[in-house]
Each structure stands twice: as structure tokens, then as C-alpha cells.
């Protein structure tokens, strides 16, 4: 007998598979299919747990005596087709021995007395302005042009040893032209941190700068529409007065004439400290992915969701193949 399990009109989901059960979700009810039975009976129990989205509107399974390989292959096709586009790592500077970009191939260019030592980009904060110790890039990042369609996430593990007035961890845009993405280590001499993004009203100091001479994690996400979210050490931090998420101009409109880690296009102080890791993602990391990245640390990268799903489903296929 080859039964067919049909879902409702809404899309179906697949969640956890172990040696006993496949959990499937169709419509508003989640269903448990007993894989140990040679025939799937009509008695279907219900469960209340979310799952990975599938595009198929029917779950079909052939069950002679064991799980049929054909169903597993179909599930892989359905699942991978239904995965929403996720953030993809575009650039990664780890400063292990040099300024190489191990993902995007955009080697960093050291400015002034900036150096790479002990697995870190080392900056001494002098002199002020564009000539400050910092790092530029071999080719323009062009964040607006490259990531405007999908959004962008900027990640960094950094240590601030006492950077001066208006010092910046990074500044991308057109500098003194006023259309930028900037993370100010210190707003003026206030001892407060601040994020700036083109067109974002209500900018304010988000609070005391993170503790000096200790490594911190930063993630800044910007959607294609210009919605800005900031995370420090895994926790979300408000970027505008009265709201956690800022709203600026479309990301695609961001210029690319000034792009620097550690220096300002104005006469501001350069960054004093070091950068352990700097990454740029095409797309926005979710709050959960940010928390995971913070927990993993600078030497590991959060698995990209599509890759994780393929790995998991591939393992599932092999498991049932061995049992058949």
C-alpha cells in the first residue's frame, strides 16, 4: 500500500526527523507520521512546534516497509526551494598575518602607521583626520551598489583603548558630504557612543561607550529600505531617540567615495585600539544569528541557513539509505 498524506491549501513545513517520527506541518496543524509502521494509518497525532518552510502543498510518502528514498529526495528539493534568501558572507578580514580578505578578495590597504600584529589590526589614533592610522581597501566596497538590493550587515570584534573625540570604528559613504554609515566610538568628548546613517532622523547617543581596553562585538544591520539595527555584545541597542530601529534612506543610495576602518574624513581623532575581525554580509543577520555569532566569537562564522539545511537533509537522506 502506498498512502498519500495531503496537506491543506496553505504551505507545508517539515521539522524534526529522528529514527521514529517525521514531524510535518500543514495549515494550522502539525502532524506526526510514524516511520516504524509499514503503513501510515489514518490516526495522526498533532503537535505544536514550528518547522522549516516547504513550498510543496502536499506531503507524499511511499512506505513499503521502510522510509522510501524518493520521499527524502523530494523533501530536499521542496525544502531548498522554499528557503528564503539569507545573509551571505561577502568579506572577511581576520588579520591573522596580513590584511587579506579571505572571502571577497578585497585586500585591505594600511594607512599611516597602521599595522597587523598578533592577529589584530593595530591603530594608534594619530594623526587626526583622513591621514590617521587606518585601513582602506584595494577596490571600493560600494556598499550601496553591492548590497542595496538585499541589505547589509557589518560585524566587528574590536578593542577601544581610549579613542578621542568623534573617533570612528568605521565610516563608509562620502565623508564630509554627510551621507554615511558611521559607528562613532565616542560622540564628541561625551564618552557616549553613536551610530549615524544617511537620512536617519532622531540620532542620539545610545549610552556610555563600551568598556575600554576590552574586546567587544558589534553588529550593524541595514535593510534595503534603510532600517537600521545595532547590536553590541549580542544585545540590541537603540539607535534613535524613542525607537530601537532607525529609519534612513534606501541603502542603494549610499555613496562610496570614502571607506575606512579607524579614520574620519573630518579632522576627528583616529581610533586608538585594535580590530580582531571585520566582516561584511550581503543581507541582514537576524537577532538570533547575531547572538549566535557573538557566542561563537571571531574565529568562527555562523553557518549560512541554506548550507545548514542542505547538510541536515543530506544527513537525513544517508540515514534512511542505510536503513533501507
Image (cartoon, rainbow, N blue to C red):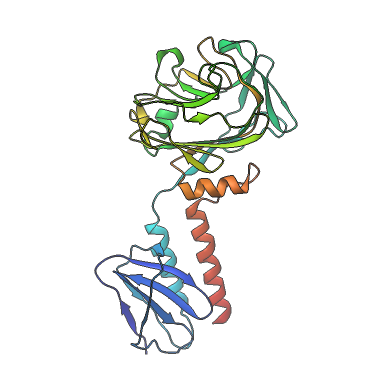
Say if 135 sits above or below 288 in the image.
above
Quarter in which the N terminus is drawn:
bottom left
- Residue 171 point in image, percent of width and height: 50, 22
The quadrant holding residue 115 is top right
Residue 317 is situated, as x and y percent measured from the top left of the image, at 52, 71
Residue 284 in the image, given as x and y percentages of width and height? 44, 42
Q: Nearer the viewer, residue 185 or 43?
A: 185
Report the residue that reaches farthest toward the right: 118
Q: Quarter of the image for the C terminus: give it.
A: bottom right
Q: Residue at x 49, y 86 (%)?
A: 36
The residue at the point 65 percent across, 13 percent down is 126
Taking the spot 40% from the left edge, 81% from the top edge, the residue there is 62
Apparent side of residue 298 relative to residue 55 in the rendered image (left or right): right
In the picture provided, is 148 more to the left or to the right than 121?
left
Tell me if residue 29 comes above or below residue 130 in the rendering: below
- Residue 54 appears at what percent x and percent y? 37, 63
Q: Is residue 323 above or below residue 255?
A: below
Of residues 174 and 159, which is closer to you in this image? 159
Q: In the figure, residue 60 lies in which quadrant?
A: bottom left
Q: How many marks?
A: 0
- Most foreground residue, 322 or 223: 223
Amino acid at each position: 500500500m502506498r498512502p498519500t498524506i495531503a496537506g491543506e491549501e496553505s504551505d507545508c513545513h517539515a521539522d524534526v526527523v529522528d529514527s521514529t517520527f517525521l514531524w510535518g506541518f500543514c495549515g494550522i496543524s502539525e502532524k506526526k507520521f510514524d516511520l516504524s509502521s509499514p503503513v501510515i494509518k489514518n490516526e495522526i497525532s498533532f503537535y505544536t512546534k514550528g518547522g522549516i518552510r516547504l513550498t510543496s502543498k502536499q506531503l507524499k510518502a511511499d512506505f513499503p516497509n521502510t522510509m522510501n528514498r524518493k520521499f527524502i529526495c523530494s523533501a530536499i528539493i521542496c525544502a531548498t526551494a522554499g528557503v528564503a534568501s539569507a545573509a551571505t558572507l561577502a568579506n572577511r578580514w581576520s588579520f591573522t598575518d596580513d590584511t587579506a580578505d579571505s572571502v571577497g578578495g578585497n585586500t585591505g590597504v594600511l594607512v599611516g602607521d597602521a599595522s597587523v600584529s598578533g592577529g589584530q589590526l593595530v591603530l594608534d589614533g594619530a594623526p587626526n583626520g583622513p591621514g590617521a592610522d587606518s585601513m582602506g581597501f584595494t577596490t571600493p566596497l560600494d556598499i550601496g551598489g553591492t548590497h542595496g538590493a538585499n541589505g547589509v550587515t557589518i560585524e566587528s570584534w574590536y578593542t577601544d583603548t581610549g579613542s578621542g573625540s568623534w573617533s570612528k570604528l568605521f565610516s563608509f559613504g562620502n565623508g564630509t558630504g554627510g551621507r554615511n554609515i558611521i559607528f562613532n566610538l565616542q560622540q564628541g568628548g561625551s564618552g557616549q557612543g553613536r551610530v549615524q546613517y544617511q537620512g536617519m532622523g532622531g540620532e542620539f547617543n545610545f549610552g556610555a561607550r563600551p568598556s575600554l581596553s576590552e574586546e567587544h562585538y558589534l553588529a550593524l544591520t541595514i535593510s534595503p529600505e534603510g532600517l537600521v539595527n545595532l547590536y553590541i555584545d549580542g544585545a540590541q541597542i537603540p539607535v534613535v531617540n524613542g525607537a530601537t530601529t532607525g529609519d534612513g534612506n534606501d541603502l542603494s543610495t549610499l555613496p562610496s567615495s570614502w571607506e575606512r576602518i579607524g579614520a574620519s574624513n573630518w579632522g576627528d581623532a583616529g581610533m586608538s585600539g585594535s580590530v580582531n575581525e571585520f566582516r561584511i554580509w550581503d543581507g541582514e543577520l537576524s537577532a538570533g544569528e547575531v547572538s549566535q555569532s557573538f557566542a561563537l566569537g571571531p574565529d568562527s562564522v555562523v553557518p549560512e541557513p541554506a548550507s545548514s539545511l542542505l547538510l541536515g537533509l543530506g544527513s537525513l537522506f544517508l540515514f534512511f539509505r542505510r536503513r533501507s
